[in-house]
Image (cartoon, rainbow, N blue to C red):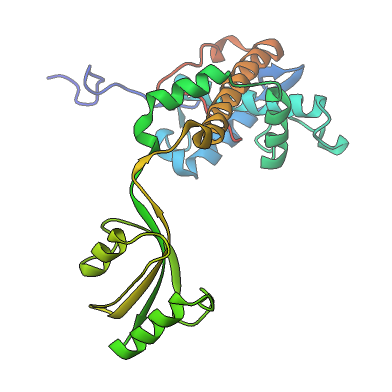
Amino acid sequence: MADPGAATADRPTVVATEPPDRDPDQPIATVAGRPIRRADLQRRAEEIRRGPRGKHVPPSGGSSPEIERWIVRELVTDAVLAQEAWAAGLLAADADADLGTSDGRLSPTVMAALVDRVSTGVTVDERAIRSFYDRNQDRYRRPEARRIRLVVRPDAEAAREAARRLSSEAGTVSEAGDQAFELHRGELVGPIEDAVFAAAAGDVVGPIETAHGWSVAVIETARPAGVEPFESARSGIEADLLAAERVQAFEHWLEARRAALTVLEPDFEHPGHPLHGATTHRH
């Protein structure tokens, strides 16, 4: 009979026990000449076990080569970022500590400053902005809308008084009971919505009885259905595309700096593994 604990094609063995005699001071990588030691790897592994990624890491005392390589890559990335931030003058002099430890991560403020510094020259071509607009017309379709001021009163007489007030120049949103908002079809129901969308800018609608009382609305603006013009959408498109280009530029820069500054011990090379997917950074 086959050993029930043996690995099969359907149940691979992924956990290996950590040999007790591994030296915690053993260097496993260097970044700009600074060592990352096995103790740093063990600390980061325990930190991961305590967090949301803990389900991907074997229990304390266990490990696997693939997971160790990914943790080392994470430590290396943190060390490279800290080294580059220090070289750029973004870290205080007393921050020049052991950048290979789990405590060597950059604060969000310093990380943002480093990203800005690296990607400051990135731009977006005007043709790319126009192309994005042309290929994504559904994003810029605008439904018919009315901006209204709405008042609801408990009886018809109070509603008629509100209608007279809203028709006068004295009516203001700050008066008690007024609500000002943009309305799209389907957001109100019944005769009040039909009347609002049949009216033009400046018209007063009501009083109309609704489930909440007697409603009166003044139409401040009326916008027909259509497509937002390119000139109006352009700045938002440029901002989105620029953000994506800056992230990509930073990723390319970081990969190059990792290659230039890092020496890995042979056991920790080739870190690519699908466990964590694409490498991500705290920007």
Image quarter in which the N terminus is found: top left
**How many numbered marks appear?**
0
Image quarter in which the C terminus is found: top right
Tell me if I can see residue 254 in this picture: yes
Q: Nearer the viewer, residue 246 or 190?
A: 190
Left or right: where does residue 97 sit relative to residue 181?
Answer: right
**Spot occupied by residue 245 in the image (x, y as percentages of width and height):** 57, 23
Q: Nearer the viewer, residue 266 or 256?
A: 256
Instruction: Tell me which residue sits at (65%, 29%) in the image.
Output: 78
Left or right: where does residue 95 sit relative to residue 175?
Answer: right
**Spot occupied by residue 182 in the image (x, y as percentages of width and height):** 41, 59
Left or right: where does residue 146 sit relative to residue 107?
Answer: left
**Spot occupied by residue 8 in the image (x, y as percentages of width and height):** 22, 18
Instruction: Tell me which residue sits at (43%, 38%) in the image.
Output: 228
| 270 lies above or below 52 | above
Left or right: where does residue 44 sit relative to residue 5?
Answer: right
Instruction: Tell me which residue sits at (68%, 38%) in the image.
Output: 103
Tell me if I can see residue 155 in this picture: no
| 58 lies above or below 118 | below
Q: Nearer the viewer, residue 251 or 140?
A: 140
| 51 lies above or below 10 | below
